Image (cartoon, grey):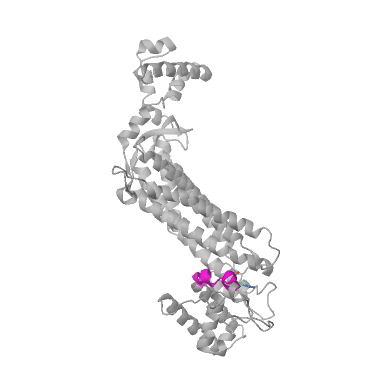
Amino acid sequence: MAQLWGGRFEKPTEESIRKAIDSVYFDKRLWSEDITGSIAHARMLSASGIISEEECSLIVSGLNGIAEEIADGRLEVTPEYEDIHSFVEAVLTERIGDAGKKLHTGRSRNDQVALDMRLFIRSRIDETKDLVLSLMKTVLDIMEANTDTVLPGFTHLQKAQPTTLAHHFGAYFEMLRRDYERLCDSRKRMNLCPLGAGALAGTTYPLDRDMTAAELGFEGPTRNSMDSVSDRDYLIEFVFDLSLIMMHLSRWCEELILWNSNEYRYIEIDDSYSTGSSIMPQKKNPDVAELIRGKTGRVYGALQSLLVMMKGIPLAYNKDLQEDKEVSFDAVDTAMTALRLFNGMLPGIAFDKERMRESAALGFTNATDAADYLVRKGMPFRDAHSVIGKMVLYCIEKDCALGDLTLGELKCFADTMGEDFYDAVSLETCISRRLTKGAPGPSAINGEIREAKEFLSSVCNPGRN
Ligand code: ARG
């Protein structure tokens, strides 16, 4: 029987339930984290005088050998073992004999698996941070090239006021900035080492928990051993971070799908990120964007599963916690795939600036500016709103824009109307007057771009934060 326990049992586990309770099928993915953690543990056992230096070097070279062989495919993690921890320990003992049996001194699979998952999540946080940053760089490039690309801003999916592509994409830059900062916060909070917590109540061996924590790149050891083995907050936090990233990507994809449609024609997604139809020869579908939108639900599902899985677990370790793996692995894979796809798709999008401008010129996106014009001429805003509303109705009937009305027509609505009205409601003026911080006007958007650049250079250069 390939398992780590059995002394107090009179019968083996029923073979048919093994498949349902063993985790090796999916936790084999943690082989590298498991071995890294074991090496640090063995070194600490030796430094603390709990095992000899010879035993330690046998263990370390045995573990390194196992890692190399799994990495290059010579050694396969097979399911006769209950989990990855049992597999590694059994293979090690088979190879180096009694020293292998000492590896688990002062350790439990409870603190071992808690460590493996933290190492796994920490490295995925770092990869996700890199993917988010690379997307932010592309967004910034697009912003810089499009500070005067005018398009309609929408509310309720109705044309509202003119803005620019730089300003529109600046909104996504901010979402990604928060995503990045959230990842940094989560990393900081989770970067403590649970190793040494034992099964739940620490151990009687003089373990040096600071040493293993430092060796594994943690800020220090976790503070309470019961919490250490039963805490999965860091996992939930990361999957929440991923859920928000997916939510941002999904909203963005929805817009790109609309903008790519025949009705909008603001953009064209590259052929390499589109697919055709088996029956309709004309079709070019934005499948990648649709899939990212679709995959969002899977990540939310994982978050929900983890929250529900955790809510009734008494301290400390319970087997329910094993259910943390499959859903979080899937959430991590899904979100990172979505980020990679988006990173690939965005630089290849062609923006039809003409078409965006035309679209902004229709639909009375300058109506607020027309009302502001009357305010500047001395009319209270509420009255100006009503006057321009009537003008809009008149234009709808005439099928024209506000700027197409003659001065005579304008004066019928308000006698303060003058020649300068036409310039006041031109798209260029509408944009250039919007100079409040965060608005699309030239000095405002340039300030936003400058801040975005500063942010990227501050996070891209120093070490992980
Ligand atoms: N496969 C287990 C898990 O993922 C490892 C810890 C097992 N501990 C135990 N006491 N059964 O949680």
Camera-side residue of 14 and 372? 14
The x, y position of residue 357, in whole percent, is 34, 32
Q: Is residue 297 above or below residue 405?
A: below
Residue sitting farthest toward the left: 281
Q: Residue at x 47, y 60 (%)?
A: 333
Q: Residue at x 70, y 73 (%)?
A: 201
Camera-side residue of 48 and 342? 342
> What residue span does the magenta drawing correspond to?
17-30
Relative placement, left or right, of 410 versus 204 is: left
Camera-side residue of 450 and 140? 140
Q: Is residue 248 above or below residue 66?
A: above
Specify whether residue 464 is in view. no
Quadrant of the rendered image holding ligand 1:
bottom right
The x, y position of residue 137, in whole percent, is 39, 51
Which SS type dominates the magenta stretch?
helix
Q: Residue at x 61, y 83 (%)?
A: 48
Q: Residue at x 54, y 60 (%)?
A: 327
The x, y position of residue 247, in whole percent, is 50, 48
Specify whether residue 336 is in view. yes
Q: Is residue 49 above or below residue 411?
A: below
The x, y position of residue 106, in whole percent, is 64, 79
Relative placement, left or right, of 272 versus 381 is: left
| Total numbered badges shown on the rendered structure | 0
Q: Which quadrant does the N terminus fall into?
A: bottom right
Relative placement, left or right, of 218 versus 290 is: right
